[in-house]
Structures are given as C-alpha cells and as structure tokens.
Amino acid sequence: MAFTVFVDGQEGTTGLRIHEVLAGRRDVELLKIDADKRKDAAERARLLNAADVAFLCLPDSAAREAVALVENPRTCLIDASTAHRTAPGWVFGLPELCAGQREALRRTQRIANPGCHASAFILLLRPLVDAGLVPAATPLSATSITGYSGGGKKMIEQYQAQPMEQALTSPRPYALSLAHKHLPEMMAHTGLGTPPIFLPVVASFYKGLAVTVPLHTQALGTTPEAVHAALAARYAGERFVRVMPLRDAATLEAGFLDVQACNDTNRADLFVFANATQALLVARLDNLGKGASGAAVQAMNVHLGLDEGLGL
C-alpha cells in the first residue's frame, strides 16, 4: 500500500524539488491541490488530514496556520520553514545529529526540517561540543558561501534575468544585522551557549553551499588530529555524511575548494584544514539537497521506517 503525501506549498523551490524526488516512487501517492484552491483553507485542511506525511513548504506564519488545520493524529508534518526548528514537541530533522535521533524521528508526528546553513554548521560543531573539544561557551564565527537558489523564486529571477545587474556579478554578504534566522537552531542543536558571529554570502551560481568555521585549536587545548578524529568517529558508517581526510590532499593540490561538488546529491562533505595551532572546519552540501528537499525526504524515509536513502 502506498503512503499518501501532500506538499503544502508545492509551487516553491523546496516543494517543487520534493515533488521531483517523490514523483517516480511507487510507494508514494502524491496528493495535489488544484491551482485555484491553493489558498483555500478548507481544501488544504482536507488534503493535510488525508496525508500520511505532509510537507510544509511555506513561510513561517503560513506553516503555523497549516499546523492548526491538522486534526488527524496520524498525519506526520515535516515543516521546511523556520517556524518550529527550536519549538517544544518538534523533532529536528537531522538523522545524523546524535544517537537516538532516528528513533525520535520514527516516533514523532512533528518534524522540523533544518536550514541549509544550519545543517552544515551543526554537522561540524555538534560532535566537537559533545566530545568536549569545543566548550559550549566558546565564541565562534562562521562564514557561508551559497548559491542564489536559497533565496527563493524572487532571488532566482533576479539572478537569471538578462542582462544581469552589475551588483549581482560579485559575491554579496548579507544578514549584516547579525540576526540571521538560522542562528537559534545553530545554537540549540550544537549545545553552544553563545551565538556564533555568522556571515552568509550569496554568489552568482545556482546552488551549492560551504560553511567555514575557524578554530584556534591550540587555544582550545586540542589538536587538528583530535578534531578530525571526533568527526570521523561520529559519522562512521553514515551514508550521507563523508568526513574527508585531514588536510585533504586533493583540495590542497587544486588550491581551491569546489563549493558545488555535492550538488545533485544528499551528501555533506566535512573537511579539517589545519596548521599546528589553527584549523578551518568546512562543511559542503547542496543547499537544495541535504540543505532542504533531500533532507526532508530523508526524514520522511526514516519516519516511515523505509530505506533511508530511498529516492535520494
């Protein structure tokens, strides 16, 4: 018997990609809303309550409204917005987060899909905080370079317009108010007690993302080898998280990190580049894959007890 799935907000970038991933699966029946009823609360409520799994690919306020429409206790909601990523009663949709996370995803009916920048940052830092290599009170900074698809339809249109505006041809730092919407989950799901100083940068390529976190390993009383070993131990056997060799020789030989090398996968690559006293931690992923739609489908697979990589 097929599982019924509804994507509320199927016309957005994340929703469209989820539809693409699920369209060819025989174990899934996609419920679709008529175009003229996309904002009809009664029709949305009918489909939400008819689904085994409903993805909320909506702005935060609309996602909260959608949750209020659900009365069927068997409907599992997977919210791709920021609305519930630190909310009580919601499980963070990152199966690799810690021991027991997959079991929590199986048991819950409320899953909050991680943000793209946050996924990369958390994959790097959570094992190090858990291991005591990075104390929770450590002040950190992080920089993320990302493709423009993460900005949604409006930003995609801006970058794909011809001719391209001159201002869009160079990388553009943003969130300069130091209040990026991913910061709460970056703290909550790493165990850090201080918000990192976070600088995201959007550039003129479609997708791909790399978050870099500098560490003064000597000042922290640790070594690059210990940091790398903690990451390797945490993600040993993980299908979608790959810890690259310490001071990855191929990247150093090339001289540049390819930010787009995980595109069209659900994979995250983790790197530790270092000298004797400092390290650069880097996490690379597809911001539309492991950073959004791929992560949501992975969480669905885990929740339903299916092969975690099905369709991915």
Image (spheres, rainbow, N blue to C red):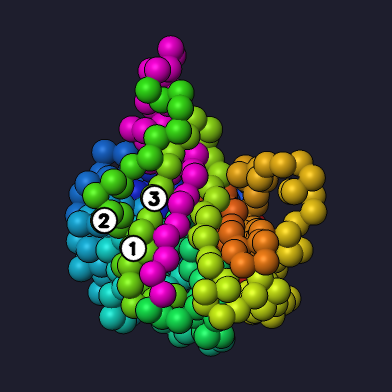
Residue at the image point whose x is 45% and y is 57% from the top: 142
Identify residue for label 3: 199
Residue 310 image point, x, y percent = 65, 63
Q: Is residue 160 magenta?
A: yes
Kindly identify which residue carries mark 2: 179
Residue at 53 percent of width and 48 percent of height: 209
Q: Is residue 144 left or right of residue 226?
A: left
- Mark 3: which secondary structure? strand
Q: Is residue 21 above or below residue 132?
A: above
Discs 1, 3 touching: Cβ within 8 Å: no
- The x, y position of residue 202, in whole percent, is 43, 39
The tag earlier along the polypeptide, 2 or 3, is: 2
Q: Amino acid at mark 1?
A: Leu
Q: Amino acid at mark 2?
A: Ala
Q: Nearer the viewer, mark 1 or mark 3?
A: 3
Q: Is residue 42 visible?
A: no
- Residue 265 in sight in this render: yes
Q: Which residue is mark 1?
A: 183
The residue lying toward the viewer, choosing from 276 and 282, is 276
Magenta span: 138-166
Task: Name the image quarter holding the C terminus.
Answer: bottom right
* Coordinates of residue 80 in the picture (x, y in percent): 38, 59
CB within 8 Å, label 2 to label 1? yes
| Tally of numbered discs | 3
Q: Is residue 226 magenta?
A: no
Three-letter code, disc 3? Leu
Q: For this rendering, which residue is in front, 249 or 99?
A: 249
Q: Secondary structure at mark 1?
A: helix
Query: What is the CA distance from the residue labelled 2 to the residue labelled 1?
Result: 7 Å
Residue 132: horizontal and vertical position, in percent? 52, 85
Residues marked 2 and 3 touching at CB (< 8 Å): no
